[in-house]
Amino acid sequence: MKITVIGTGYLGAVHAACMAELGHDVLGVDVDSAKITALAEGRAPFFEPGLPEVLASATASGRLRFGTSLREAAEHGDVHFVCVGTPQRPGSNAADLSYVDAVVEGLVPHLRRPALLVGKSTVPVGTTARLTRLVERLAPAGIPVEIAWNPEFLREGFAVRDTLNPDRLVVGVTSDSARDVLHELYADVVAAGTPWIVTDPATAELVKVSANAFLATKISFINAVSEICDATGADVVSLAQAIGHDARIGHRFLAAGVGFGGGCLPKDIRAFLARADELGAGDALAFLREVDGINTRARERTVARARELVGGSLLGARIAVLGATFKPDSDDVRDSPALAVAAALHLQGAHVRVHDPEGLDNARRAVPALDYAEDVETALDGAELVVHLTEWQQYRELDPQLLSGVVDVPRVLDARNALDPFPWVAAGWHVAALGRPDAAPAVTPDLPQVGLRTAA
Ligand SMILES: NC(=O)C1=CN([C@@H]2O[C@H](COP(=O)(O)OP(=O)(O)OC[C@H]3O[C@@H](n4cnc5c(N)ncnc54)[C@H](O)[C@@H]3O)[C@@H](O)[C@H]2O)C=CC1
Ligand SMILES: O=C(O)[C@H]1O[C@H](OP(=O)(O)OP(=O)(O)OC[C@H]2O[C@@H](n3ccc(=O)[nH]c3=O)[C@H](O)[C@@H]2O)[C@H](O)[C@@H](O)[C@@H]1O
């Protein structure tokens, strides 16, 4: 099938490459010419495991090309995927749909044969209906143009796998023909056993934001409980393990810590709230304000805990930060809890040096005021506190024995509850965390603390 993918960022670049892998003839289009140049040369413009390999294979097959012209897109495709950003509108909770609108306005007047526009961007419920009216106004006479919504559920870091083997495919359509085109397009994925859900566009739009709102709620739930653990000396990690054994609850998305960030969960719950308000149903989602609030508090609790650990004032404190990206296996720093905490520590007078395996370039651009280090040892050199903020595998594998000779004070705040405290304590480190009691070598070995037992 001849398809275009418009917007080749974290979502669109992966979608374009994977669609070509599935055998389609794909043109990827973006207004960012640097991104398009990289992609056209077979280079991934951002860090995403597995993407370089799929790009190379799809480019070699001759089925994947890139360009910057929507006119060319109109000529190339029978199906046009819209994958542009829908960020939070400045000064508001609502989604900024101007990029989506610009694509429709730039593409539709150039169409010369029947086409199906398929939205993948995350949008407020009602967007497909509104765009349908726009498309009707813009489509050349006699050219049938339909619009459907096919929300995307991929996770950064697993984007290729999630695109080729998704948990489900959801298509919001208003005609059997649109449903059949999308079924044919995803035939191999559906044949592999992926649940195939056909619904109306409004439901499809709502499925997406509901899924993200549920995930955000699960994280904030465990972070709220983590606050209670802090107040009582209980251990949120053991607690999450225990409640997760109930299959109705499950273990995933119960990792307490500095909270959620990224280009999606935070802005999606806010846009959902804003849309509910517009619909006069704001009360129904009022709890999402608290989900957002708990998430903000998780960042504040991390800063407060760091302040306490260095003796009550951050002024002049030498702090090493491990992690800048919003999650491991991504270079994405959009609304990153790690960078937000690092920036707050800096603003309160600490000397902050940040390390990240893949996110340093983006972090430097986003928060130029911080010091950045290319390797962990340089970041930790002379530090009196290490704050672990993004749980890269590299950090889980650090040798605390070796590092105790690099820092001034062997003290780590594990704000992701992801480090195994035993080797750290054995190497003489004080290990603090969120929602768990501290573990320190001085604790009497016969009286282990709850959760973080000492090494002895
Ligand atoms: N990043 C992710 O993991 C996922 C993102 N989404 C949704 O997908 C959408 C895109 O997200 P990302 O890829 O993360 O954003 P992004 O910012 O990485 O990519 C958006 C791309 O659209 C391009 N663009 C903007 N206006 C354009 C235009 N008029 N014509 C052509 N290209 C244009 C930008 O230059 C950029 O490359 C958002 O709605 C997001 O919520 C959904 C699921 C997963
Ligand atoms: O709409 C989107 O863009 C995507 O948003 C999330 O994917 P992603 O943002 O890539 O990352 P997640 O793995 O969901 O993590 C989001 C944030 O939550 C945090 N998190 C996650 C899990 C957890 O238990 N605790 C926790 O704090 C992560 O550190 C990260 O900051 C969803 O998981 C995807 O299904 C969705 O498609």
Image (tube, rainbow, N blue to C red):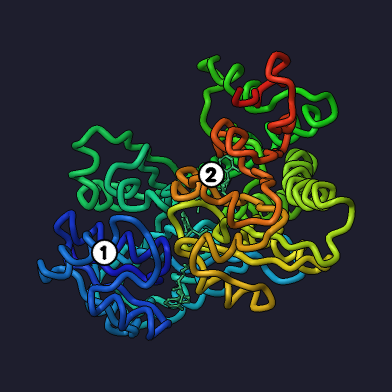
The residue most toward the front is 405
Q: Which residue corresponds to the image point at 50% horizontal and 49% vertical from the top-left?
A: 395
Quarter of the image where the C terminus is located: top right
Q: Which mark is residue 52?
A: 1
Q: List x then y, in percent, for residue 398.
A: 48, 47
Q: Is residue 258 visible?
A: no
Q: Relative to 175, is 373 on the left or the right?
A: right
Residue 288 position by quadrant: top right
Q: Which residue corresponds to the image point at 37% horizontal and 49% vertical from the top-left?
A: 158
Identify the residue under disc 2. Answer: 401
Considering depth in this image, is 238 or 284 the residue closer to the camera?
238
In the displayed structure, 428 sits above or below 313; it is: above
The residue most toward the left is 61
Residue 109 position by quadrant: bottom left
The amino acid at mark 1 is: Pro
Considering depth in this image, is 203 or 233 the residue closer to the camera?
233
In the displayed structure, 153 sits above or below 363; it is: above
Considering depth in this image, is 428 or 148 the residue closer to the camera?
428
Q: Secondary structure at mark 1?
A: helix
Considering depth in this image, is 104 or 30 the residue closer to the camera?
30
Q: Which residue corresponds to the image point at 62% horizontal and 68% vertical from the top-left?
A: 96
Q: Relative to 30, is 228 on the left or the right?
A: right
Q: How many marks?
A: 2
Q: Relative to 302, is 136 on the left or the right?
A: left
Q: Earlier in the sequence, mark 2 or mark 1?
A: 1
Q: Which mark is residue 112?
A: none
Q: List x then y, in percent, for residue 63.
A: 14, 68
Q: Relative to 6, is 129 on the left or the right?
A: right
